[in-house]
Amino acid sequence: MTIRAPSPPDTNAVHRRLAPARARLAARDDAIVRSQITIAQIAAPTGEEHERGSWVSRRFRDCGLTDIHTDDAGNVIGRRAGTEDAPPVVICAHLDTVFPRTTDLSVKRDGERLVGPGINDNGRGVAVMLALAAEIDGGRLRTRRPVEFVATTGEEGNGDLRGAKHYFASRGGAAHAAIALDGAGDERIIHRALGSRRFRVVFTGPGGHSWAAFGVVNAVHAAAGAAARLASLRLPHSPRTTLSVGRIGGGLSVNSIPASAWLEIDVRSSSRAQLEELERTIRRVADGAAEEENARRAPGTPALAVRTDAIGSRPCGETPIEHDLVQAAVDATRLVGREPDLALASTDANIPISRGIPAIAIGAGGRGGDAHTHSEWFDNVHGTVGVARALTIVMAAADLVA
C-alpha cells in the first residue's frame, strides 16, 4: 500500500491558515477535557441515549448552530451554514456506550490518566465534535459548504449503527463527505469499512423430564452441535474473515430436557461475498443440527424446530486511498507530525461508505485503552494534535473560505 508522500498545496494552505484556530483550540484544551468527563458521566446505554443527547443539544445551541433537532432515530443534529447552499460535510460522533444504566460512571484520575467507563469511547469523540462546532463559527472560520454535526445513536453492539443508517438514508443522503470521530488517537485513518452480520439461531422442542421423557429431542444438544460445527469451519485468511459464537443458552433445569436453546453468532469480513457465503453456511449448519437431533428422537415424539434470524448487519466497503478526503487526512496527519495508519474497522463511517458517500473515521486526539471495560482510560498526551488534525481534515473537505 503506497501513500503519496508530498502534501498537496490545498491541504497545506488550509493548515497554515488554521494556525489561529489551532491556537484557540489548544487554549481550550482543559475545557475540552472537562466536557469529555461530563459526557462520560451521563448514562447513555445503546437505545437509551436521550439524556446525553439532550445535553449535547444544549451545547449545540451554545455553539450557535442552527436547525438543531432530534430525529426519529434519536440522533441530535445541528448545522453551520456555508457561504453556498451545497451538499454538507458531516461530522458525527456516537452517543452510546456498552455500559448498562446501573454502571458507576464516575471518572477518576490515575496519574496522567482519566479512568472511567466510556471516557474514551466515545466521550472523547463527542467532546471534540463540540469543540469543532464552537470553533467553526461562520465568522472567524467560514466554509463554502455547510457543516452538519450529528451525535448518533446505536453505534455499539446490537444498536447496529441505527442512528447512522437513519441519518444517511434520509437527511444525510446527499452529503458531500462524512468524518466520524471515535475515541482517541491521531494517526489512524479508517477508510475501509469492516462488514459484519449477526444471527440468532433458536431451537425449540417439547421438552420433558430427563428420565421419564428421555428420547424426545434436546434443544441444547442441537445448539451445542451447531456451535461445534461452526467453530470447525475453515475461514479465509485473505480477505480476513472471522466467525464467533458469542452467546449460547437454554434449558430449564439440570433434570429437564430443554424445550428451547439458542446461540448468537458474529461474522466479520471486508468482503460482502464472504459475509453472504457464511450466512448461507450458518443457515445450513443450523438446519443440519436440527435434522441430526430429529433423527435420534424416539418414534412418535415431536420434531425439533429451528429458526435463524438476522439480528444485525453492518455493510462493508471503502473510500479509495486516492480519494481527496483520504488524501487530505493523510496529509493532515503528516502536517501535525504523525505518520498515517490506513486502517479497516467497523464504525459509523460504514454507512456513508456503503451508500457511496466518501467517509472516514478518525481518533480525536490523545491516547486511550481498555475500551468496553470498567477500567477504560484516556490520557490527554498531545491531545491538541488530534484536535488540530481533525480541524484541518474538516476544513479541507468543507472548503475553508479566505
Image (spheres, rainbow, N blue to C red):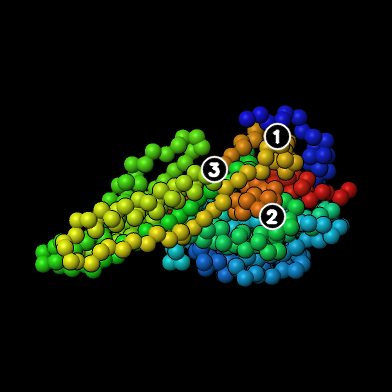
The CA span between labels 3 and 2 is 24 Å
| Circle 3 Cα neighbour tier, 10 Å, few/some/many (<14 / 14–19 / ≥20) | many
Residues at marks 1 and 3 touching, judged by CB atoms closer than 8 Å: no
**Which comes before the other along the chain, label 1 or label 3?**
3
Please identify, in this view, whether the residue under mark 3 or under mark 2 is nearer the observer.
Answer: 3
The residue most toward the left is 212
Amino acid of disc 3 = Ser
Q: Is residue 12 above or below residue 120?
A: above
Q: Position of residue 141 (x, y in %)?
A: 82, 53
Nearer to me, 179 or 385: 179
**Disc on res. 270:** 3
| Circle 2 Cα neighbour tier, 10 Å, few/some/many (<14 / 14–19 / ≥20) | many
Please name the residue that numbered disc 1 is placed on: 334
- Apparent side of residue 254 relative to residue 248 in the rendered image (left or right): left
Please name the residue that numbered disc 2 is placed on: 91
Amino acid of disc 2 = Ile
Amino acid of disc 1 = Arg
SS category of the residue bearing label 3: loop
Residue 32 in view here: no
Q: Position of residue 291 (x, y in %)?
A: 28, 55
Which residue is located at x 72 percent, y 30 percent?
Answer: 4
